[in-house]
Image (spheres, rainbow, N blue to C red):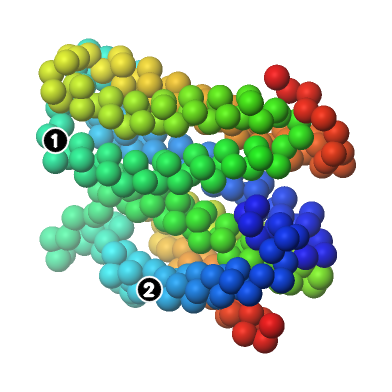
Amino acid sequence: MKNTNFYIIPIVYMLLYTVAILVTGIWLFLLSQGLGDESIGVTLYHIIEAPVLKSIYGLMEVATPHLVSMGILIFLVAHFLLFSTNVSKAFSKKISIILFITAFANILAYFMISFGLFSSGWLKLLLMGSFVLLFVFVLLLVAFSLFSNHSKETSPSKFP
Amino acid sequence: MKFVISKDLEHSKLLNTLMMGVSLSLLFYLVFDVILHGFIVGSDIPTISNTLYGNVDEFIEPILLDTLLLQVHIDLFMSLLTLMILSTMYIRLFSEEKKTKWLIHLLFILGLVTPLMLLVAYMSSLFFVYMWILMLLAGHLLAIFFAVRIVKKLFSL
C-alpha cells in the first residue's frame, strides 16, 4: 500500500459512471412516457397531465431492482464523504439520509398514480428532479473533497 | 474501499481470503458476461446486425431503443461495481508498479465507453459494432487480467 494517490482514479471514474447511469435512467423513464414519438417538452406535459398507466407488475419489475441498485449506488458514492475533511460528518449524514429518502420516494411515487391517489404525474417529476439534483450535489461534494482537500488531509472541517 | 485502504488490515489473512473469493467470483462473472452479451446482442456480425438493425428479408424487427437502453443502463451499473472492486484491490497489491495507473485508466475508460458504443452503433453504422466488439473483449480481458493477477498475488502471500 505504497501509493494511496492511485485511489483517486476509481473515485473520479465513479462520478462519471454515476452521471451516465442517471442520464440513461432519466432517458429510459421519458421513453416509457412516449419520448420517442414526441419532444421532451410535450412528454413532460403529458406526464403532468396524464401519465402513462402502468400495472402493478410493471411497477414492481422496475422498483425491485432499483431498490437494491440505488441503495448500493448511494452508499458507494456517499461513503466517500467519510474520507472528506472539507465536509463535516454531520452534514454528510444529513445529506445522505435526505438522498436515501428522496430515492425511495422517487421509486415508489408511481405506485400512488397506479393506486389512483394522484391522477397527475407532477409528484413523480418533482421527486425525480429532487433526487437527481441532490445526487448531483453529492457527486459535486465528493469531487470537491477529492480535489480541494488532497494535500491537507488532517485539517479541520470547513463545510457546514 | 475504506477496509481495503486501512493500515490496520494491511496484514489481515481474513481480508486476503475475502479478496481472493470476490476476485474469483468476479473472474467467473466477467467470462459469463461476455457469453451473456453474445446471447442478448449476438455472437457474430450478421446476428448483431439483425438484432440492432433488423432484417427485412427475414422479417426481423430491430431491437427497441428502450430495450437496448435498459441493457446499457444495467451494463454501466454492473461495470461500475465490478471495476471499483477490482481496481481497489489491484491498487492495494500493485500500487508500486508504474503501469498500474495507466491500466486502471484504460479499464475504466473501456468500461464506460463500451456500453455507450452499443448505443452509438444502434444509431449509426456497422463500423461501431466492430468497435463495440473490440472494446467489449478488450475491457473484459483486461478485467480478467486484473482478477487473475490479484488471485495469483494473494495465493503467494
Which residue corresponds to the image point at 42% horizontal and 71% vertical from the top-left?
Answer: B29
Question: Would you call the spot at circle 1 few (<14 residues within 10 Å), some (14-19), or many (20 or more)?
Answer: few
Quarter of the picture holding the C terminus of chain A: top right
| SS category of the residue bearing label 1 | helix
Which quadrant holds residue A62? Answer: top left
The image shows residue B96 at horizontal and vertical percentages of: 81, 70
Up/down of B100 relative to A7, above or below: below
Up/down of B85 relative to B20, above or below: above
Which quadrant holds residue A158? Answer: top right
Type of amino acid at the residue the image marks with label 2: Phe
Q: Which residue is mark 1?
A: A56
Type of amino acid at the residue the image marks with label 1: Ile
The image shows residue B125 at horizontal and vertical percentages of: 41, 57
Up/down of A138 relative to B149, above or below: above
Chain of the residue where label 1 is placed in the rendered structure: A
- The number of discs equals 2
Discs 2/1, front: 1
Q: Which residue is mark 2?
A: B32
The image shows residue A144 at horizontal and vertical percentages of: 72, 33
Chain of the residue where label 2 is placed in the rendered structure: B
Foreground of the two, B121 or B17:
B17
Which residue corresponds to the image point at 71% horizontal and 57% vertical from the top-left?
Answer: B6
Up/down of B103 relative to B149, above or below: above
Asked if one can make out residue A158 in the rendered structure from this viewpoint, the answer is yes
Which quadrant holds residue A93? Answer: top right
Q: Is residue A8 left or right of residue A64?
A: right
The image shows residue A154 at horizontal and vertical percentages of: 85, 39
Foreground of the two, A99 or A120:
A99
